[in-house]
Every structure is written in structure tokens, then in C-alpha cells.
Image (cartoon, helix red, strand yellow):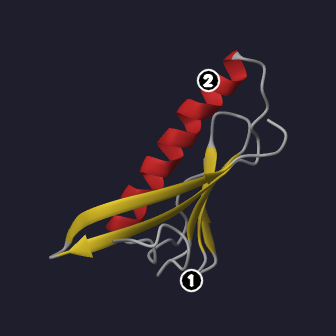
Amino acid sequence: MSSCCQKPARKLEGVYDRNIHTVASHSGVEQKLGRAGCCGSAEFNPFDLFALSLASCMLTVMGQAAQARALDMGGAKACVDYELADYRVKSVCIKFTMPCPL
């Protein structure tokens, strides 16, 4: 079972930027993906992109719900890890860190 961001094999992180968008980063290559697209991001493999897109989608839905309630969750983070088995995603673990106070 995945350690769920305790000691992830890869450090993938999505950060909500208050504008119904997220910025994703990959610590192993010090690259970010955001609204402007993907520039020179060959180090993000399809599994990384899948896991990050799931976390970004969840952050965006949560951000929309927060906005509807006049809550500011800008800076909320999602730490993502996944486990593979035979080149298939076996599990995805997403740990959310919310700004305090929310």
C-alpha cells in the first residue's frame, strides 16, 4: 500500500491559486505545470500527469465550493503519490493540506 505522501517515491504537488486553477510541480525535476501549459516538461510521465490531474480536479471542485460559500482556500495543497503494478495504476493517494483558518 502507498505511504500516501509520508515518504513518497516522487514528490508531486498541486497548489490551488484562488482563480479556479492549480499549479502542479514535480520536485525531482524542479518543473511546474500551470495555466500557461507545459514547457519542456518531458520529465512528467503519463502516470504523473494522471495523478496530478486527479488532484488538480479535486482541488478545483473544492475551490468552487469554497468560493460559493465565500471561503478563501487559496494555497490549499494536494500531495500526491501513486503505486504501479504491471504498468497500471494500482492506487492513488492524495493528502490535502488546507489553509488555516478556512
> Which amino acid does the dot numbered 2 rest on?
Ala
Disc 2 packing (10 Å; few <14; some 14–19; many ≥20): few
Where residue 84 appears, x then y in whole percent?
A: 26, 73
Is 46 drawn above or below residue 8 in the view shown?
Answer: above
Q: Alpha-carbon distance for marks 1 and 2?
A: 32 Å
Label 2 secondary element: helix
Residue labelled with disc 2: 65
Image-quadrant location for residue 29: bottom right
Q: Residue furthest top?
A: 68
Residue hosting label 1: 28
- Quadrant of the rendering where the N terminus is positioned: bottom left
The mark nearer the N terminus, 1 or 2, is 1
Q: Secondary structure at mark 1?
A: loop
- Identified at 50% across, 40% down, the residue is 58
Q: Amino acid at mark 1?
A: Gly
Of 7 and 35, the residue lying toward us: 7
Q: Which residue is more in the foreground, 73 or 34?
A: 73
